[in-house]
Amino acid sequence: MKAIIVGGGIGGLATAIALDRSGWQVEVLERAPEFTEVGAGLAVLPNALRALDRLGLGEEVQRRALDQAPVGIKDVTGRWLSRNDATELRRRYGQWAMLHRADLLEVLRAAVPAEALRPGVTVREVHRDGAVVHSDGTTAADLVVGADGIGSTTRRSIWGPQPAPRYAGYSTWRMIVATRPVGEAAETWGRGERFGYSPLPDGRTYCYAMVNAPQSRGGGLTELRARFRGWHAPIPALLGAAQEADVLHHDTYELPDLDTYVAGKVALVGDAAHAMTPNLGQGACQALEDAVVLASAVAGAGPAGLADYDRLRRPRTQMIVRRSRRIGELAHWSAAVPVAARNAAMRLMPRSSLTRSMGPVVGWAP
């Protein structure tokens, strides 16, 4: 049986690997001229590492990554609001992996048969019967997987323009700083803005900033340096060492709940199905989970197994979308009194509660 995967990002390539190893003939259509990733750092959490293990790639990803469990959250002075027990996190849930997104994509791309990769092909329309209309013609398949992101052509073709992606209320900047290594991963919450950083395996530092802002509002390093100049070290130094050309800026969106992730011979994975805010670090992780569950669901049943995929994936991913949204709302409170109350409550929360709270997200196994 033949599967066409629309989109050659993390979710699309992982799905191609999983299906190929289940005996499917796969074809990956990617509109970009090559399979590349321009993102910055990426945390691969234990649930996603278990998905990669199922694909036979977990060890290779960990070899390229830094084992970096999240240390915790600080206030703007550097005082801890919450601090994780990294040893207990690893004991209970497994390893964390921090690496560049391009390194993960390289591992995935190398595991897909070269003849299955078709860059420079723009998909224009997808039909429920498995027909895919694209810039090179029309191709029919027994299964079509829409892995084409939050603006998915696959989703719009079959599900229509609604629900449309929804702006979360804050913008995100990401960058990699070469000259200011840090020893641990941490995030700092202020009033309507926050900053995070994490070491990368090669000694560079991945940084991100999130700021309450109107949709499509610009701003670069000059603004970020002014906003965060009074925050604790090493935040001002990291921004001072960053290069404007390395800064990626985008608005933050999520996708409202879909009633189903499948229709006819078509299934959605990753952001095409459940784009979420980045507050739990689960966007790519959930796409990896999707890939292994989808391949398992259709391994013996073919497209008839898509109902099982939807039953298994939709409740879990939509739960994580909601959790991520709530964390973002809490992190982006801006009024002084609620922020002070939030910070006080976070300091009182025991570490054991923080560790247990991660279970429903990172405790997943295929």
Image (cartoon, grey):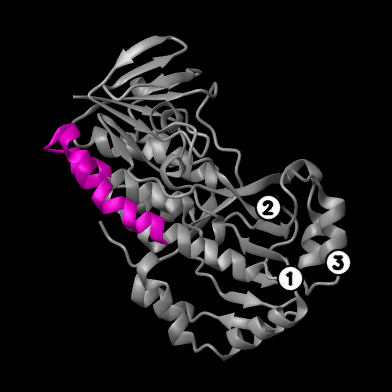
User: CA–CA distance between discs 2 and 1?
Assistant: 16 Å
Determine if the magenta segment contains residue 303.
Answer: yes
Q: Is residue 88 above or below residue 29?
A: below
User: Left or right: where does residue 153 sit relative to residue 217?
Assistant: left
User: Left or right: where does residue 279 sit relative to residue 216?
Assistant: left
Res. 72 image quadrant? bottom right
Determine the secondary structure under disc 2: strand
User: CA–CA distance between discs 1 and 3?
Assistant: 18 Å
Res. 268 image quadrant? top left
Determine if the magenta segment contains residue 365.
Answer: no
Label 2 with label 1: CB-CB less than 8 Å: no
| Residue 331 percent across, percent down from the top left | 63, 69
Q: Which residue is mark 2?
A: 172
In terms of sequence position, does the residue under pointer 2 or pointer 3 come before the other? 2
Q: Residue at x 46, y 33 (%)?
A: 148
- Specify the amino acid type for callout 3: Arg
Q: Which residue is mark 3?
A: 229
Q: Is residue 353 above or below residue 219?
A: below
User: Left or right: where does residue 155 sit relative to residue 254?
Assistant: left
Q: Which mark is residue 334?
A: 1
Closer to us: mark 2 or mark 3?
2
**Over which residues does the magenta segment extend?**
294-319
Determine the secondary structure under disc 1: loop
Q: Is residue 57 visible?
A: no
Determine the secondary structure under disc 3: loop
Q: Residue at x 65, y 63 (%)?
A: 197
Q: Residue at x 48, y 49 (%)?
A: 256
In terms of sequence position, does the residue under pointer 2 or pointer 1 come before the other? 2
Label 1 with label 3: CB-CB less than 8 Å: no
| Residue 66 percent across, percent down from the top left | 51, 60
